[in-house]
Image (cartoon, helix red, strand yellow):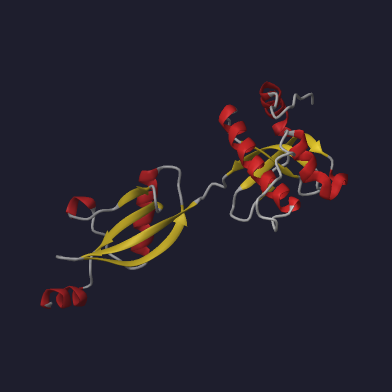
């Protein structure tokens, strides 16, 4: 892939290459259920350069001549690594601001051959086909969360609530319907995620205890 330097990428070529070739990258499963695919857009410095790579990358971007710290204990090697990290963050932010996309552009080391590359990466979240059902005991003057369990999530929310009510009934609880003062509903929470609430009647002994209090 052709490129122009002096600290500036050819943005149109980068965008075009990513769009044309990202489907060739293999999806890899991550540790938290997500999947990612990573495309090497260009190798900036080959891995065989080894420990010289940081200095070569700084030279490539015109950042190699800034060493001159006041602290004599701050070596040039430390300065090179710190400057490279700052450069990576700066370029990564600039690329993603200039090239808004579904994925993420960044520069860094290739995890397999140690070369220094320009990457484009996309993530795909694994769809969660389970949902929590919260059983809530509703007394005259109180609410009490009795238990929480998971069930398979149907595509339709109304169907999900109906199946949750059936599952709660199978556990021996008596549902309090919405029309009788209950609240059986599909809940969407931006912080805790989606869940289903099912209100149930208290047993007679517990209700008597609450009334005595």
Residue 28: x %, y % from top left: 69, 47
On the rendered image, what quadrant is the N terminus found in? top right
All told, the count of numbered labels is 0
**202 or 93, which is in the foreground?**
93
Residue 95: quadrant of the picture: top right
Residue 147: x %, y % from top left: 36, 67
Residue 198: quadrant of the picture: bottom left
**57 or 9, which is in the foreground?**
57
Q: Can residue 113 be seen in this view?
A: no
Which residue is at a point 70% across and 46% down the rendered structure image? Answer: 68
Which residue is at a point 23% across and 54% down the rendered structure image? Answer: 177
On the rendered image, what quadrant is the C terminus found in? bottom left
Is 106 above or below relative to 81? above
Residue 158: quadrant of the picture: top left
**101 or 77, which is in the foreground?**
77
**192 or 54, which is in the foreground?**
54
Q: Can residue 167 be seen in this view?
A: yes
Q: Residue furthest right?
A: 48
Which residue is at a point 39% across and 64% down the rendered structure image? Answer: 148
Residue 7: x %, y % from top left: 70, 30
Which residue is at a point 16% across and 74% down the rendered structure image? Answer: 210
Residue 15: x %, y % from top left: 66, 26
Is 207 above or below relative to 193? below
The reply, left or right, for residue 63 in relation to residue 159 is right
Q: Residue furthest left?
A: 212
The reply, left or right, for residue 74 in relation to residue 213 is right
């Amino acid at each position: 892939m052709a490129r122009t330097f002096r600290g500036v990428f050819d943005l149109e070529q980068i965008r075009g290459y990513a769009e044309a070739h990202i489907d060739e990258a293999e999806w890899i499963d991550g540790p938290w259920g997500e999947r990612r695919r990573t495309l090497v857009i260009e190798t900036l410095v080959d891995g065989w350069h080894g420990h010289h790579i940081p200095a070569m990358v700084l030279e490539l971007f015109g950042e190699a001549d800034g060493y001159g710290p006041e602290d004599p204990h701050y070596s040039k090697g430390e300065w090179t690594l710190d400057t490279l990290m700052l450069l990576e963050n700066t370029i990564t932010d600039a690329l993603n601001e200039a090239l808004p996309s579904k994925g993420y552009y960044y520069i860094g080391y290739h995890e397999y051959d140690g070369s220094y590359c320009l990457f484009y990466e996309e993530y795909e979240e694994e769809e969660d086909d389970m949902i929590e059902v919260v059983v809530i005991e509703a007394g005259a003057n109180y609410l009490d969360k009795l238990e929480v369990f998971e069930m398979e999530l149907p595509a339709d929310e109304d169907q999900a609530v109906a199946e949750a009510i059936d599952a709660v009934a199978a556990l021996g609880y008596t549902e309090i319907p919405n029309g009788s003062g209950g609240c059986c509903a599909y809940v969407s929470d931006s912080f805790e995620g989606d869940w289903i609430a099912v209100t149930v009647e208290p047993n007679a002994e517990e209700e008597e205890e609450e009334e005595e209090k």
